[in-house]
Amino acid sequence: MAIDTRNTDILAASLGRPIVLAFGRHLVGGNVILQDESDAANTVIFVALGEGIWDGIDSLNVNGVDLNLATSGIYHFHKGLDGEFSAGSTLDPEGVGSPYNFSTDGDQKADLFTPATVQGLTFSRTAYIALKIPFDPGAPSGAVSFQGVFRCRKVSIRNSVGTETSFAFSDNPAWQIADLLVSVRGLATSRIDWQSFIDAAAYCNATIDVYGDASAFPRRFVSNIAFTQDVDFDQALEAILATCRGSLADYGGKIYLQIEQAADPVFDFTMANIADGSFSAQFIDTRERPNRLVLQYRDPDNSYQIVAQPWNHEAQQAKTGGIVPAQLALGNLPQHQAERLGDYMLLRAINNSLYVKLRSSQASLAVMPGDVVRVSHDAAPWGPQGGSARWESFKVLDVADNADETRDFSLQVYDADTYPDLAGPSQELYTTDLHRSLSAGGTAVPVAAAVPIEWNIEGTIEPGDFLDLAVRLFADRSFSALQFKNLTGPDDQNMVIEVVVNDGTSDSVYASATIPAGSAESAVVDLSALAAIAAGSTVRPRVLAAPYGTVTTKAEILYGRMV
């Protein structure tokens, strides 16, 4: 199927512009560097694509017509190897060029399609394609349009000591970042902590239940980023890091790649190991921080159409009374990944606004940037002193080692909900009540609000239906009760609701309640003992017995939050 160029962003280069550096898959228009029409039957064009070495072609389209990649004699694809002389030590074309598919890497010799009147060139280290296009008498003009979807730059995959184990195409952001550091920046492989890159690549490559209903299991993060203009190296790094919640840390002479993710605390900072006078805590004013991101990406699941998707932190907008916009360019990636990254960016910048600085003893020697820690201090601004409330969890942003063997730490408050694997708005981004119709086999809806939360359910209810409401349990929060109340309905029939807990493996009935017949009757399900149920479990109400006809039932969370 031809791709409509009006709705796509095509990688293109022009004379005088830098050569394109492209990672992952891209829709490429390229730069026509040679066009020859001396043969009345055919037009020959050479199209420069980008800095090699590229991997291969997914599809080609010329003048609105998809080419059959198995057809020989119409195109030669050169991956961008080092230039080679012909067998006669000249730049004269020879043999059959480099027709796709090649069993090996082909060659970077002067292409066989080079016109006789043109000096042969190898275009060393530049991926390019040569095409011989038959004359089309039905074409509206003699101009040639070209585009294709290409698997772009190949990168090194390495083991824990930095030895290359393969050289291959990869849309994994961890290996693309490694390629930028080593191949583009020129850092020695000894400067890289390769185990951190291996771990990051595995985390990005893991499949996730992205919609929470076992309907799709994509990889967590992919990266398809291209640089078509001069760009600062640090900006290039940030562009790829943004696709995977990534950050780099330079510590102890090694560069570590960290992917922001939920984690358990590895260390407790207390009055016993925090140096006197070194503790400070500050809530950052977030009113000027962006509360609306415009997610800019090309959707590979939708013919690479350009998407500019607003992503709002409605709670912050309501609190500050205004919208502070910002743009987030993400390259080519699926919608669900863009949305999860939007959640992360907004939550991290706005919700996680508490920062701590402290100096610790040698006891903290094993703590590294990116670790999660707990902090308790008499001067802390969180919670009443005593009990579990005296602890707060933080992510380690930076560590500095001092000559006296103490260590200075910069910390940002940590919340596991900042790193969602579910697509759709995070529960922290909304504060308004929602009203949703009954849905058989109802799904969890990403909503949060100041408690109590009301949820109106209207429709014909059948036994076995799940109400369209779910409560997710969190390790650091509890729930006191769910209340169900009839607003309208038959006066002579009760409704029985049971609360079902799913721990990620199976359903189990936790409790049930009977709502008496008639309007304004209610029943409360006590959830106070749910603290004993594993964090991450989901609680859903299910109808056990239902009245005939249409009813309106109000479900109210008396304390807690929804996802």
Image (cartoon, rainbow, N blue to C red):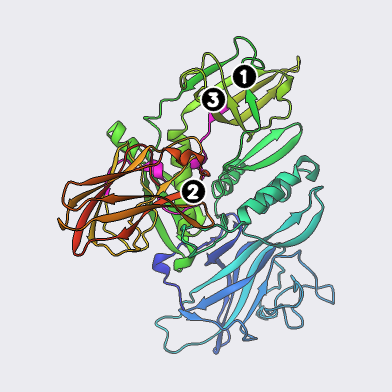
- Measured as percent of width and height from the top left, residue 511 is found at 40, 49
Q: Which residue is found at the position 66% from the left and 33% from the top?
A: 266
- Measured as percent of width and height from the top left, residue 70 is found at 62, 84
- Measured as percent of width and height from the top left, residue 243 is found at 54, 50
Q: Is residue 263 magenta?
A: no
Q: Of the residues under marks 1 and 2, which one precedes in the sequence?
A: 1
- Measured as percent of width and height from the top left, residue 191 is found at 77, 40
- Magenta extent: 411-434
Camera-near label (2 vs 3) is 2
What residue did someone put label 1 on?
A: 270
In front here: 286 or 80?
286
Q: Which residue is found at the position 42% from the left and 37% from the top?
A: 528
Label 3 amino acid?
Answer: Trp
What residue did someone put label 2 on?
A: 537
Label 1 amino acid?
Answer: Thr
What residue did someone put label 3 on?
A: 391
Residue 304 can be seen in this image: yes
User: Which mark is on residue 492?
Assistant: none
**Is 517 situated left or right of 287 in this image?**
left
